[in-house]
Every structure is written in C-alpha cells, then in structure tokens.
Image (cartoon, helix red, strand yellow):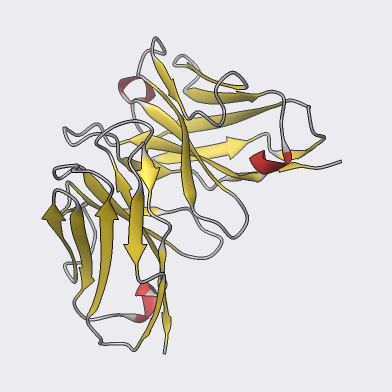
Amino acid sequence: EVQLVESGGGLVQPGGSLRLSCAASGFTFSHYWMHWVRQAPGKGLVWVLRINSDGSSTSYADSVKGRFTISRDNAKNTLYLQMNSLRAEDTAVYYCARDSGGIWGDAFDIWGQGTMVTVSS
Amino acid sequence: DIQMTQSPSSLSASVGDRVTITCRASQSISSYLNWYQQKPGKAPKFLIYAASTLQSGVPSRFSGSGSGTDFTLTISSLQPEDFATYYCQQSYSTPLTFGPGTRVDIK
C-alpha cells in the first residue's frame, strides 16, 4: 500500500524549532518529488515547500523562506521539514504529499494523515 | 503569485443534485489546474488533474473543464459521500497556490 506517515508535531514556543518527518512506503520514494502543505485550523490549504527527487533542488513559499528547510534521505525513504524561528501563524496541520510526476506541473496525488504543529507560549 | 478564487464559498445540495463549482485564476494557467476533495479531519484526496483528467479510482460522476483562467468542477449526481470541501490548485508556477475552498453540505 502506498503510504505517507508524518510524525514530530507538537506544541512549541514562539521562536522555537521543530523537525517533522514523513516516512514513505509502498513506492519508490527516490523517484518522486515531495512537498509539504499546511492547513491552519479552520482554514484552507497552503503549499509550503518542494524538493526534487535527489534532494538537489528545493522551492519555498515566501512565508517560510529562511526559517524552514526541506530535506530527504532516500536511503531511509523519509522526508523532513526543519522548522526554525516558529511563529504563531505557523500553527497548522502539516501534510507531506507526493508529487504526481505528471507533465501538467506539480499535483499532489498521495497525502499523509498530517501532523499538528502548535506555536504558543 | 497566481491567485486562485472559487465560487461559491459554500453550497447546500441534496443527494442526486448536479453541483458545479467554479475556480478562477488571476492569470492564464492553460490547463495546469487540479482539484481535491477534503472531508473534515482527513487529508485531501486528489480528484482531477490537467483541468479535466480524472485520477484513477475517482467516480465518473466527477468531471472537470476549462482552460486559461476559468475552470469548473461538476458532480453530476451528488452522493452522500461527496459532502466535503473542494479545492482547486494551480500547478503552472511556484508558489503553487490553492483556491479558498468550496464547502458542499447537505440541504
């Protein structure tokens, strides 16, 4: 079964750091670009970051540039999100998502169940 | 950045109704448009890509159309499991952006 499982969420104080993980199974992880998408409570979906299949290229939303870092370990089939200098507005469910790999740009065909990050004092 | 809008923001419908949701991009995105369904407390589900191509396993009552800046998602005969929030997303350029969502609930 194709699956993504996030972990690492929790409560963190403003200015703090957190690292999320996303474990992939059921497909050849190293062949796919991957993304993080977040959703604040009661709000819509917001794309945050993207990494290519070998980890050599990344793209970031302006809202997290300089604070968040996406990386991957293809040997461990795991995607990571390092979040630093966290702000209250980063509070959200964070989803990892697989890029469909099609010719029509970046679409998200497989999603994890999400992990909640709460930034509060 | 490409801004995505959706209308309506919410709608009430009955089982068996035909439902149409509109998505508009702030600039032309050709057919680089995808649709997702999200139920409360769950991850989104991928429905349609390239504006009109159904993802494998998605029921044929779902259809998409449009190109350029204007797109629609149609559910031909609403089923109980279709009550959810629907999001469009442009894949033309980064930052990838979603519409604000359209909530479909039971009349």
Q: Quadrant of the N terminus of chain A?
A: top left
Residue B16 in the figure: left or right of residue B39 = left
Q: Residue furthest front?
A: B26
Residue A83 in the figure: left or right of residue B65 = right
Residue B38 lies, in percent from the top left, at: 43, 60
User: Could you tell me if residue B88 is visible in this image?
Assistant: yes
Q: Quadrant of residue A82?
A: top right
Residue A89 lies, in percent from the top left, at: 67, 42
Q: Residue furthest right?
A: A121
Q: What residue is shown at x 59% (from left), y 18% (from top)?
A: A66
Depicted A12 relative to depicted A45: above or below: above
Q: Quadrant of residue B63?
A: bottom left
Residue A101 lies, in percent from the top left, at: 25, 31
Residue B15 lies, in percent from the top left, at: 31, 87
Depicted B62 relative to depicted A70: above or below: below
Q: Quadrant of the C terminus of chain A?
A: top right
Name the one closer to the observer, B106 or A47.
Answer: A47
Q: Quadrant of residue B8?
A: bottom left
Q: What residue is shown at x 17% (from left), y 46% (from top)?
A: B50
Name the one closer to the observer, A26 or A89.
Answer: A89
Depicted B42 relative to depicted A20: above or below: below
Name the one closer to the observer, B14 or B102.
Answer: B102
User: Could you tell me if residue A1 is visible in this image?
Assistant: no
Depicted A64 relative to depicted B63: above or below: above
Name the one closer to the observer, B93 or A92.
Answer: B93
Q: What residue is shown at x 54% (from left), y 32% (from top)?
A: A22
Q: What residue is shown at x 13% (from left), y 57% (from top)?
A: B66
